[in-house]
Amino acid sequence: MTTQRMTGTRIREKRMDLGLRQAAVAEAVGVSPSYLNLIEHNRRRIGGKLLADIARALGVETHSLSDGADRDLLDQLRNAAALAGDRAEVARAEELVARFPGWAELVTMQARRLASQDERVRALTDRMAHDPFLATALHDLISAVTSIRSTAAILVSQEQIDADWQRRFHENIHNDSLRLGKSSEALIAYLDAPEESNQSSDTPTGQVDDFLARNGYHLAALEDGSAAPGDIVAQSGLTGAAAALLAGICAQYAADAQALPRVPFAEAAAACGYDPAQLAVQFGVDFATILRRLPCLPPDAGHPPMGLAVCDASGALLYLKPVPGFAMPATGGACPLWPLFGALSRPSQPLRAEAILPGPAAQRLLCYAIAVPMAVPHFDMPPVLRSTMLVLPDMAEGTAQPVPVGVSCRICPRAACASRREPAIVGTATAL
Amino acid sequence: MGKRVLLIEDEPNIIEAIGFILSRDGWTVYTHQDGHTAMAKVLALPPDMIILDVMLPGRSGFEILRELRSTDVTKDIPVMMLTARGQEKDRDLALRLGANHFMTKPFSNSDVRDYVRAMMDA
């Protein structure tokens, strides 16, 4: 009915723009003025020959009166209005689209930009809370300030302090003040540096990431089979390359969900402590499928946080589900020590490793990874490998020799790392 | 010989300052800088009280506290946590895990001394 109502409004607007009387147009197309009046007020359906005749009488293309593409614009406009509460005249949205399509497009574009900026702010807030460099830098600052404050308080107290202690405390204050200066400069340099953000909603990958994040990486309609991958892509509103990327992800998701139905799989996963090896044996599926499937379990069902990364043989990320403590730069340049990349050199061999992040918190993450060929091999051609890594931040066991990973060299404080490929943009004074 | 306080903290200058203050106040101060081996140090002493930093190399103070409270010989030792993170959730976590007191850096020397006295008198 929306299209019908909009078509009538369009006819009326166009006729009035041309300065034509209703009776004249009605006569030209062979209907009564009162019937045309009903059409123009969206009280009668119109289509086929009559719509074509009216379009001809008004000198326009038929589709310009009935183009269904504007339904999307109308829906987006209503969504934008919903964000503004009850201040917008929602009932007159059709009129706005019909009379001022450019303005309507502008409103919806700005609403999309605002939503995208909100996402970005949330991501940056998350980064501030979990960035290992910031945690280290702030810890250094507070430690230096604490030391200076305590030492200075001792020196200015009325107590008698012998000369040796006085000299040591003066030296400590001097050293801490130097450290404080360096740490402050490093922090300012870091905060002034160009942002290295994973949020890139302007790219197809970024748009797909945004869509998956909004859905909590759990696509319920694919779980119960109530929708096909194509339906999800259509509902996402994504087009072009982003739609193609999402279609591939949804197809894989649907196949995994069919192989490992949610309820029995979730129960078995919880029962075995989310051990991929046990689950692979129990369900008789390959290891990579288990790694992909576990992070798709609904986040609000009591499962532990589970991250996922998938890359090709070049190390380019094809899929990333970040979780607190685990992130990778979407544009490349990730730490090469993650088991995700190590698995590429040992195809088909499952890896289990405990990773430890830099910084004072030294967060540990349990990682499972495997790289498997994705296509039929050809003579004289390298195999098409795809590596998959599951990350379980809450399930590390405190192994004696964890793998010292980072996010990327640019913000990693490990000075002596043999895998470093570029200097950190901040000092690496703290050996971690 | 005064009562024994074990200070588990990785910043040498903070160790020196707190050690000086408490020594002057009559305590015998032991220090340790590594999270991994902290528990072994506690068991070897064991001290009358522990001042425990949250962010330590190798193992967090929260993990050490959890183990202290689940080990028979250490479960009743008073523990004061030191942290650069003053968020409510950290304070809640420390107290829930069994810390007797939680102090945010930077702190004043007199606060440290007063709390140590109070905890030992309690």
Image: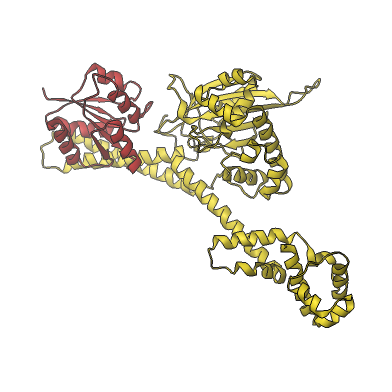
The colour one sees for chain A in the rendered image is yellow
Q: In which quarter of the image is the C terminus of chain A?
A: top left
Residue A31: image location, x then y, percent: 86, 76
In which quadrant is the N terminus of chain A drawn? Answer: bottom right
Give x and y (percent) for residue A408. Answer: 54, 35
Q: What x and y, as percent, mark residue A175?
A: 30, 37
In which image quadrant can residue A398 be found? Answer: top left
Which shade of the palette goes to chain B?
red
**Residue under the image location 57 percent in, 30 percent down:** A263
Q: Residue at x 14, y 28 (%)?
A: B27
Residue A87: % across, % down: 54, 68
| Horizontal arrangement in the rendering, residue A412 relative to residue A345 (left or right) | left
Q: Tell me how many marks there are.
A: 0
**Coloured how?**
by chain
Using the image, determine if residue B118 lies above or below residue A288: below
- Of residues A169 and A345, the one nearer the viewer is A345
Q: In this view, does B88 lie above or below B41?
A: below
